[in-house]
Structures are given as C-alpha cells and as structure tokens.
Amino acid sequence: MDVDLALDDFFARRADMQLQVTGKTGVEMEALTAVSVAALTVYDMAKAAEKTMRIQNIRLVEKHGGRSGMW
C-alpha cells in the first residue's frame, strides 16, 4: 500500500492511494477507505486554521485484474 499526499502550504490538495494484493478478492473498498481516512486526518489537523475546507471527488481511478478485468 502506498499513500501519497500532495501538499500546498499546510493543506493537502490531492491524496493518491495505490494497493497491490495477491489474494482473489478486490481491494477497491479498502483503497477508497484509506484515502478517505487520510483526507479526514488532514481535515482534523487543519480545521482550526481553515474552516472552509472540503473533502470531495473521492473515486476509484483504475483497477486491474479480478473477474471484472481492467477498468
């Protein structure tokens, strides 16, 4: 698992998550949860300084393997 936060001053502008597993089950829900928790952590740390922050556009960008193939 790899989480990358692109920072601008004290606030994250982008959080990217990359997971790789060898199991038969998909991990897209775990990846979405990890990005959400990272964004909520940044929000919690910065909420006193910036009250207008928003968390938005959390989405699965790409998936390889599994029954559904690549999308």
Image (cartoon, rainbow, N blue to C red):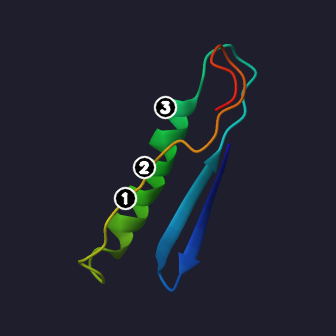
Q: Tell me the tag on residue 29.
A: 3
Residue at coordinates 69% horizontally, 28% vertically from top-left? 70
The residue furthest left is 51
Indicate the position of residue 51 as horizontal and vertical percent values.
23, 78
**What element does badge 2 sit on?**
helix
Tag shown at residue 56: 1
Between circles 2 and 1, the one closer to the viewer is 1
Which residue corresponds to the image point at 45% horizontal and 40% vertical from the top-left?
A: 33
Mark 2 closeness class: few <14, some 14–19, many ≥20 residues within 10 Å: some
In the figure, is residue 63 to the left or right of 47? right
Q: Is residue 14 above or below residue 28?
A: below
- How would you rate the neighbour count of disc 3 (Cα within 10 Å): few for under 14, some for 14-19, many for 20 or more? few
Residue that numbered label 2 is attached to: 36
Q: Position of residue 23 (x, y in %)?
A: 70, 17
As drawn, is 63 to the left or to the right of 10?
A: right
Question: In the rendered structure, which amino acid carries the disc numbered 1?
Answer: Gln
Which circle's residue, 2 or 1, is located before the other in the chain? Answer: 2
Q: Which tag, 3 or 2, sits closer to the chain's start?
A: 3
